[in-house]
Image (cartoon, rainbow, N blue to C red):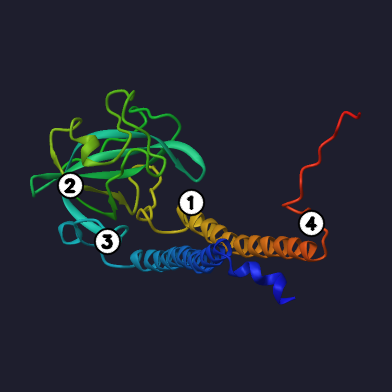
Amino acid sequence: MEGVYRFLLTPRWWGINVFVLLAIPFCIFMGSWQLSRFEGRVQEEHAANRQAASDSSEAARPLDSMLPVDKATSGRRVTAHGQYGTQLLVPGRQLDDKDGFYVLTLLRTGTGKALPVVRGWLPGRADASKAPAPPRGEVTVTGALQASETPGDNGVSAQGGLPAGQTAAISSASLVNLVPYRLYDAWVTLDKADSGMKAVPAAAPDGTGLDLKAFQNLGYTGEWFVFAGFTVFMWFRLLRREVEAARDAELGLAPAEDAAPVTVSSGG
């Protein structure tokens, strides 16, 4: 029986064995790493839910003290003071599974910068005649701080093709050519919407929560563990074929490699 397994000492099988011994731990490591990333996103989702619950009762803090916007400050309640100026519409936004648009008004603050403020959401196609005018005079706004959007992220479309008075993304880069103000690289959605509009809830910061990328991590976890199992399966399959071939050779059932070629004469 020992002679049957002598092929394991050949250079070919040394290479196969080394590959298997390296591939299996690597696949397990990568699968565990992807699983840890998914678990981290689950924990971030739970933390975000707890944070959202506490933020709703947390006292609003001055806007400038919460900048720049990051994962720690996104969604936190802030307050700002100033006068409303230019008003724009943000089409193609859903709320409660209904299509509609945001009413975005620029708040000119005493810092020389304007803060984009989403005063609320209205159903239907974006129509300036439906959007209520902003309050006049000095106002103090309170709402959730949000990071600037990027076209292509979170369903935000590109800027091109929109009529005057509309913007696709709420960001200083998108608004810089539409309004005559210096802008904060952030925006705020009001706690309570103005004039019959619906309030827009704060969005979770990018890279957190159970989004598509989180479930991709979970899918990659399964793939790496499948690769590890497939590697073991193929090793045993190759081993079995080699053992069967060696046994057949011992029993004389395998064709002799050095047998003389058979020739057929034409007779005579």
Of labels 1 and 2, the one closer to you: 1
Q: Which mark is residue 42?
A: none
> Is there any visible trace of residue 116 in the rendered image?
yes
Give the amino acid type for the residue marked by disc 3 in the picture: Thr
Which label's residue is closer to the chain start, 3 or 2?
A: 3
Contact flag, marks 1 and 2 (Cβ < 8 Å)? no
The answer to which image quadrant residue 229 occupies is bottom right
Which residue does the image show at 30% across and 32% down from the upper left? 167
Residue that badge 4 annotates:
254
| Disc 1 from disc 2: Cα separation | 29 Å
Separation (CA) of disc 2 from disc 4 = 81 Å
> Extreme bottom residue here?
2
Q: Check contact, mark 4 vs mark 3: CB within 8 A.
A: no
Give the vertical position of 201 relative to 21 (above or below): above
Residue designated by label 3? 73
Q: Is residue 135 visible?
A: no
Q: Which residue is mark 2?
A: 184
Please tell me whether mark 2 sits on a helix, a strand or a loop: loop
Q: Nearer the viewer, mark 2 or mark 4?
A: 4
Q: Are marks 3 and 2 in contact (CB under 8 Å)?
A: no
- The kind of residue on which mark 1 rests is Leu
Q: Which amino acid, mark 2?
A: Tyr
Sequence-wise first label, 4 or 3 = 3
The first of marks 1 and 3 along the sequence is 3
Cα gap from disc 1 to disc 3, whole angstroms = 23 Å
Nearest the camera: 147 or 111?
147
Residue placed furthest toward the right:
268
Rounded to the nearest angstrom, the CA distance separating label 3 from label 2 is 15 Å
Alpha carbon separation for disc pair 4 and 3: 74 Å
Label 1 sits on residue: 212
Q: What SS does tag 4 mark?
A: loop
